[in-house]
Amino acid sequence: MVGVLIRMKLAVLRHTIAGPKATWMLTGGLVGLVIAAGTIGLATTDAAPGTVADLLAVTFAIWALGWMLGPSFGGDPVLRAEQFAMEPVPRTRLALGLLGAAFVGVTTVVTLVAFTALVVFAARFGAAAVVVSIPALALQLTLVVLLSRLAARFFGALARSRTGAAVTAVITATMMVLSQSGWIVFVALDVVLETGFSRAFSLTVRALPSGWGVVAVEAAARGDWLWVVGPLVALAVLVALLVVLWGRVLGPQRLARPVVRGSSASSAAKWADRGPVAAVYVKEVRTWLRDPLRVQGLLVAPVFAILSGLLPVLFGSTALLPFVGAITALLAATTTANLYGQDGTALWLTLMTPGTELADVRGRQLAWLTWFGPLSVVLTVVGTAIHGGLWPWAIAATTAVLGGGAGLVVLVAVDQLVPGPDPHKAKNSPLEHGDVTGQGFVTLFLVLGAASPALCVVLAGELLDLPLLAWAGGPAGVLTGIVGYGVLGGLAAKRLAARGPELLYLMRAGKEHEAALSAETSVIKAMSRHRRGLLWTSFFIGCLATFPQGLVPLGMKLSGEIERVWFLALYLPEGLQWPVIALMLLIGLSAFGLAGWVYLVESRKLKARLERTAEERERVEEPVAVG
Amino acid sequence: MNAVQPQVEGGSAALRLFGLHKVFGEYTAVERADLTVAAGSFYGLVGPNGAGKTTALSMAVGLLRPDEGRSEVFGVDVWADPLAARKLMGVLPDGLALPERLTGRELLTYLGQLRGLDPKTVAERAAELLDVMELAGDAERTLVVDYSTGMRKKIGLATALLHGPRLLVLDEPFEAVDPVSAATIKRILNRFVAGGGSVLLSSHVMALVEQLCDTVAVMAKGRVVAEGPLDQVRGGASLEDTFVELVGVKVGGGEGLSWLAS
């Protein structure tokens, strides 16, 4: 069973490698390996062993949280229990088989590399500790894979109702904040390396199952065999329990049909005389409330923003509070930019009522603003009032992000559409969706770009000591926001009208239609939109990481004339500056490498296709008419 | 509508496809298909799975851009003048999504408003359509996403009928529909044709096409292999026998599978 399922998974992976997902797999794998290398680097840090153990335990906890969060962003696993529901296979065997298949993947390899940090750490205590670290490593890896699958299952089951979707959203946002805030530890790394962590902190990270491997290795170093065997057995028992639990939950899922209040004839007619924009608006507002996937989107952003803002308060800083509203809007745009992809092939109705593209876009924008606008504004006002300052920054950021977001959400939704299952085909797993990670990053960068003019105005005001100019950032934000809403929305409507049938095809077939080619077609034009997006994004990231974040701080460090401005490395403690510069250069060069690779592969593909069509044409002997 | 009227009276067909052609990668889905649906006819398009029916219909109504060829609804080019063309037709695609998180009445109201119909007319028509399709009453507390297959087909037909089109293009309207719902749909379509409307439907249920349609076309491997009045196409035999002969495939299932139920 395990062998069969692993071969099946490998076959699926082989097919995806040809598809648009492959590029993301590659980028993800590269970034993952860089982070994994960082994790191993931690194990070699020159500090008290107890402190290094603390660091490793935190890092492993973050990896585990990442695994649990993964499925809610990356979409469902390739092989699902439902697909084998009719096969006469006992559930435990199926569970083991699916677990085996779950190990096959880029993520597992990356995690395995990261977890070898435990072996590297053990190496400083001698052979016995290394021997202990290997089963610990295997158990730890199995644990995170299992946790990931169980979390996916749990969230999937919860999400079938709207309340469940809301709960999932809150849990997801909390885990996101936690897994992110873990890195706060590293900002203060220099101090920590000398003084060590507090006792409570050490105990907490060791008490988590992700830290048990570290405990065992430490005990091996001390020769305390009770504490070597104990944690390892506990890990093994936990893994076994989780396997059993997983076998249990693989059974048929209980289904319940939700019932809504609906609209009576009179209430349905209430909005009916306000034109097409109002029609779309009402439909969208209802969908935001009734679709579990949208309900989740509604909650993740504010919960994430509020928790992120409150976390520094624990350390006595309210500096992030003024930006809770802006972060809400930013994250809302990032997580809800697949509006059209989520609706699936329902686009055909818009196509069948031509001339309504603009109404469709505007209705969606207005509904998005209705849900996130007042919320962001209120959060901004409350947050800034509590902090008691930073008003120009907060106002400029919130208004610019809201307007830019409202424009970009629809533009990205049309331009970078990620096809997913049609909602009626996935009604029992409503959180199932295409992999929107790439789209999310694109939106994040673009919205930040849209917000930067207004923020630059404020920055200029502060630097030149002109308070009036700083305050002008607010109106600048409103202005760019309105322009973003209007222009980008209009652009989205134009694209929708021009490419409607192609978008529908993309959603129907799950892949793009191969266009007709001629010898003049440029490589960039001929490649699929995913590839093109990847090419430009990696080029952009390459420029950003190599020059301003890599070479410039490098030059400053060498020349000794340091101006921090926005060079990340220079804000970090002395010990981390060189590693970060190196990391930036590495990221930049690999991004350039990726862009070059995409270009090469695509130009070769185009050449091959052109040659093939030319051959076919000769064979047919008659010119193919171009219509 | 005024610009359209004279051509319609000029006796042009309800729908004409001129050499529609579509290639997906290296696979030719539809090869220069010509079809003529006369005004007032009940037209059946039959063909085995993968014959290109859905692709042809999608191109005909403007949901899929053809590589070559044209499609005209009452003389109006679907791709050149989509606005006018789509006012004249109602479409029911097979298996596509709808705005799923609305109830039936909300969906019809939304579409009527989107099409710019008068609110009062929309309310009246929505009520009537929901009644006829048996989607009123308790069903109004169910969202479209939770509809059964038959209910989805019926609400789809209601959306196609809402704006009072003169041509209906229906892709597999009876697929997976229970007999009661099928009877309802048949009755509505017959009334529509009797009232002067034209219907083009695709199906692979021969008996159904024989029962409903006056004109048929047979598609196989992306080509239209026969077209004409029902009796002419089927000759003396049943449509099913003619179909198998036309499609030119050997009927499988006679050999192999010796292990089955032995």
Image: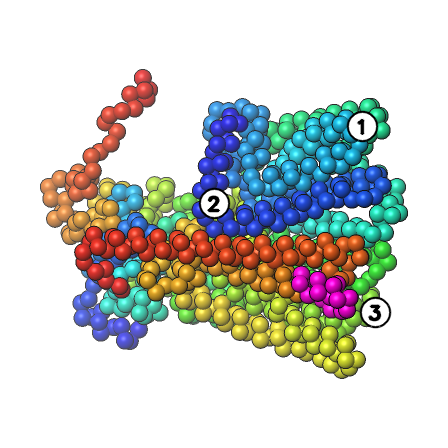
Left or right for A128, reference A328: right
Seen in the picture, residue B96 relative to A269 is either above or below; the reply is above
The 10 Å Cα crowd at callout 2, few under 14, some 14 to 19, many 20 or more, is some
Q: CA distance from mark 2 to mark 3?
A: 52 Å
- Could you say whether the residue bearing mark 1 is in a helix, strand or loop? helix
| Label 2 sits on residue | A17
Tell me which label, 2 or 1, sits earlier in the chain.
2
Amino acid type of the residue tagged 1 in the rendering: Ala
* Rendered location of residue B158, percent (x, y): 39, 56
Read off the magenta span. A549-568
- Place residue B49 in its image quadrant: top left
Instruction: Name the colour scheme.
Output: rainbow
Left or right for A245, reference A572: left
Mark 3, chain letter? A
Q: CA distance from mark 1 to mark 3?
A: 52 Å
| Label 1 sits on residue | A220
| Label 3 sits on residue | A388
